[in-house]
Amino acid sequence: MQQTWIPFVPPSASTLSGSVDALYFYLSGITVFFSLMIGGVLTLFVIKYRRRSPFEIPRPIAGSHKLETLWSVIPFLIAMSIFAWGAQVYFQMYRPPQNAAEVYVVGKQWMWKIQHSTGQREINELHVPVGRKIKLIMTSEDTIHDFFVPAFRLKTDVLPGRYTTQWFEATTPGTYHLFCAEYCGMNHSGMIGSVIVMQPTEFDNWLSGNVSQQSPAVAGQQLYQSLGCVSCHGANGEGGRGPALAGLFGRQVFLANGQTLTADEGYVRESIENPSAKLVTGFGPIMPTFQGQVTPEQLIQIMSFIKSLQVTNSAAPAVPMPSPKAQIPASAEATRPNQQ
Ligand code: CUA
């Protein structure tokens, strides 16, 4: 592991770590400045205005509007600058770019299970190429974990029954610590691993050298068949009893209750486990729940499959299309907004 010139600051190896550090140093700078200023002025005043005789009576103070305005307005402006800067960095971190490569992460007592969209699996290791955007889609099989890579300034809770996402772009090849940053039971401190950042060609070699299991999308397609989803949810609306799945991901969907949402991982999971929660306009509450029948990893596979379905009629090659019936209008698709 590389060291940095400032003690306790981890190496900086992602495109975001610079902006996080800058904000952090700004906050530290403000804190140091005001601590010194308050401490200094306090000491000075204690000496200067000390009581010199037991009978000394201080001059009454009437107050000063000028002073009060100053000490209200200056801290307000400083606080707002922290807010604006913090919000800007936050949005940068929490809005994954569209073109990011997706990697699935499942936390489990006490290991990190990782699968690339091409099918390669890893445990407690994540290999990524330098200079490419990577989006992590994370969930947990048991309790709350937290995926923490200090060198990338990346730290996100991994929750059972929910999907959290995080993205990064590594800038420097090397091996970096991966920690679980949420106390998750006896071996929490052992739930560690490495992120290995490689040159793109080296990474492609690594990827092709690894036995590629079935890709999550292909496994998801098999589940889609074996669980019977196909009979109601044709990719383009065949079956007619459930909304079309092709092109669903990331699209706006309209719910029977009048809400409009964006189809994301959280929405799809909820629609599988609790189908009546967010009914799409035009569809009845006829779908049975699949809660407990699909594992978190299988849910990820189903989502991968749904993501792979394209809207065009000739697309969705993997899905049998009995009859290309009328497509459900985009306005008849449901989704849920909050995935966090
Ligand atoms: Cu997992 Cu701590």
Image: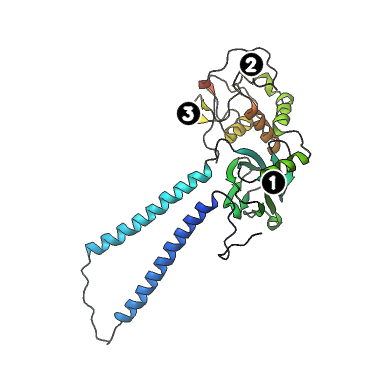
* The disc label shown at residue 259, or none: 3
Residue at x 48%, y 56% (from the top left corner): 22
Tag 2 secondary structure: loop
Residue at x 48%, y 60% (from the top left corner): 25
In this view, the residue in front, 100 or 27, is 100
Question: In which quadrant of the rendered view does residue 164 lie?
Answer: top right
* The disc label shown at residue 95, or none: none
The residue wearing badge 2 is 238
The residue wearing badge 1 is 127
Q: Amino acid at mark 1?
A: His
Determine crowd level at label 1: few under 14, some 14-19, many 20+ residues with C-alpha closer than 10 A. some
Where's residue 285, x and y in %?
59, 23
Q: Amino acid at mark 3?
A: Gln
Residue at x 69%, y 52% (from the top left corner): 194
**Of tags 2 and 3, which is closer to the observer?**
2
Determine crowd level at label 2: few under 14, some 14-19, many 20+ residues with C-alpha closer than 10 A. many
Q: Amino acid at mark 2?
A: Glu
In this view, the residue in front, 337 or 28, is 28
Tag 3 secondary structure: loop
Query: Is the residue 136 above or below the residue 316 in the image?
Result: below
Where's residue 42, x and y in %?
36, 74
| Quarter of the figure that contains the C terminus | top right
> Is residue 72 in view?
yes
